[in-house]
Amino acid sequence: MRYQSTRGAAPELDFRDVTLAGLARDGGLYVPVEWPRFTADQIAAMRGLSYVETAVRVMAPFVAGSLNEAELRDLCARAYGRFSHAAVTPLVQLDHRHFLLELFHGPTLAFKDVALQLLGLLFETFLTGTDRHLTIIGATSGDTGSAAIDAVAGREGIDIFMLHPRGRVSDVQRRQMTTVLAPNVHNIAIDGSFDDAQAMVKRLFGDAEARDALTLSAVNSINWARLMAQIVYYFYAAVRLGAPQRAVAFSVPTGNFGDVFAGYVAARMGLPVARLVVATNVNDILHRALTSGDYSAGGVTPTATPSMDIQVSSNFERLLFDLAGRDGAAIAGMMAEFDRSRAMTIPADMLSGARDLFSSARIDGDGMALALRWAQEHGGQIIDPHSAVGLAAARGLEIDADVPVVTLATAHPAKFRDAVERATGVRPALPARLGNIFEREERYQKLPGDYDAVKAYILAEAARG
Ligand SMILES: *Cc1c(COP(=O)(O)O)cnc(C)c1O
């Protein structure tokens, strides 16, 4: 498979190089030059397959030319062998039509593990036998950091530098990162917000001195391989609920538009998806964009669902690219306008194209808490606040009564114990697989919110390794 940039001015790459590069050189995001398609018979043949076998079928077209089927199967078996549930992403039924797709059975308790466990192995596979040394730089508001660190800790040929805003991630989230003492893991707590950390990372990627000294790569969802791994569970769940004969709707707690974009790709590949619900918290740029075409970024309001406290959703560009008939120059123009003014209007024809498949809902703190209690009282489930935002949106969806509605449960409730306890009176216990993170030694570097200090630290540490 070949990949092209959404801004039309970067070279086409194969899967291997797209995985290692992360962002395209023209500032765009990589997408396959065409969506592979499965026939109804091919989808029906996925019935009864294990998660790993489903993953091999769904991802094989995307990795063609870079990995053969046996190599892909080996990587999937290793990545998903680390999950604590034999079904990897089990479905749980809440009432006659609502289901949860539990995506949090990986090592760090959020759905990010599904993609990052595979990505860590892909990096290692593609670096073996080369003399390339990869320096991964990321910023995290919590979940991506721990999942990425777990996925690459101790791996040959890779260093990871993860910036988090000091004092603004939960204790569980911080300790999941800082108690990993492998020498290739470098945690940095900066004074400032997540947006400050993210801005420094973006600046490093554009810094000629840093780029000359290091081979930089990204682990956030601008990396295509992450989205690819997330397509799998849409197939896995829908086939279990009757696809291809029966269509299924999905509700997705959304921040950076990565997870829900994977659902869009599944639909383009032939999976009968009746609706994709983009569920946002009060940081509702995507809800405004999908209802009125108003894609304008405001300030970020902190909520009990921090992984969705985002105002600029990077992966939305991938959808706009498709909706614009894959016109890279048009997207480059739109994104330049957005960078200048922090606002753009989605043209009416593109908006109506999006609304053929996508619905959206904005769920505030009360709506989230109500859904947490509904899951507890009617479904017998303690869920996390992000999943509750998705469930609230799912319950508000108007759709034919015979369509099952699957809410993606994106985090384990123990990761957000305080908010869960406030709404339900139940304090979820930390699963044993987290280990004794509250007793282990922590290691991280505190740095001021100053770009030059952070850059100097990273260059010096990388030179030491
Ligand atoms: C990252 C995250 C999200 C948002 O996913 P996107 O792919 O950024 O839309 C939702 N819930 C949780 C728990 C997350 O960690």
Image (cartoon, rainbow, N blue to C red):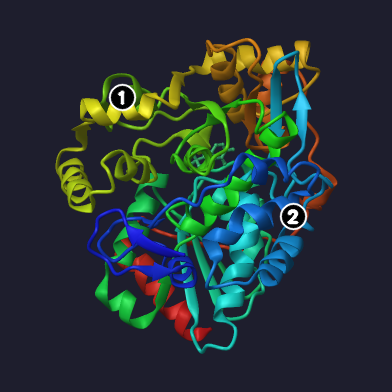
Mark 1 burial class by Cα count in 10 Å: few <14, some 14-19, many 20+: some
* Label 2: element kind: helix
- Residue 409, image x and y in percent? 65, 32
Mark 2 burial class by Cα count in 10 Å: few <14, some 14-19, many 20+: some
Question: Which of 143 and 351 lies nearest the eye of the viewer?
Answer: 351
Tell me, for residue 268, which label it has, or none.
Answer: none
Rendered view: 341 above or below 352:
below
Indicate the quadrant where residue 248 lies.
top right
User: Is the distance from the Cβ of mark 1 to the nearest ligand 1 atom less than 8 Å?
Assistant: no
Question: Which of 1 and 85 lies nearest the eye of the viewer?
Answer: 1
Q: Is residue 149 visible?
A: no
Circle 1 residue: 352
- Residue 81, image x and y in percent? 79, 58
- The residue lying at 63 percent from left, 44 percent from top is 111
- Residue 211, image x and y in percent? 32, 76
Question: Which of 120 and 184 lies nearest the eye of the viewer?
Answer: 120
Give the left or right position of residue 193, taking residue 239 as reference.
left
Q: Amino acid at mark 1?
A: Ser
- The residue lying at 52 percent from left, 48 percent from top is 37
- The residue lying at 50 percent from left, 82 percent from top is 133
Circle 2 residue: 53
Q: Is residue 414 visible?
A: yes
Indicate the quadrant where residue 177 lies.
bottom right
- Residue 215, image x and y in percent? 41, 77
Q: Amino acid at mark 2?
A: Glu
Give the CA separation, mark 2 to mark 1.
36 Å
Q: In this figure, what is the number of numbered marks?
A: 2
Give the left or right position of residue 382, taking residue 118 as reference.
right
Give the left or right position of residue 392, taking residue 375 as reference.
left
* Label 1: element kind: helix
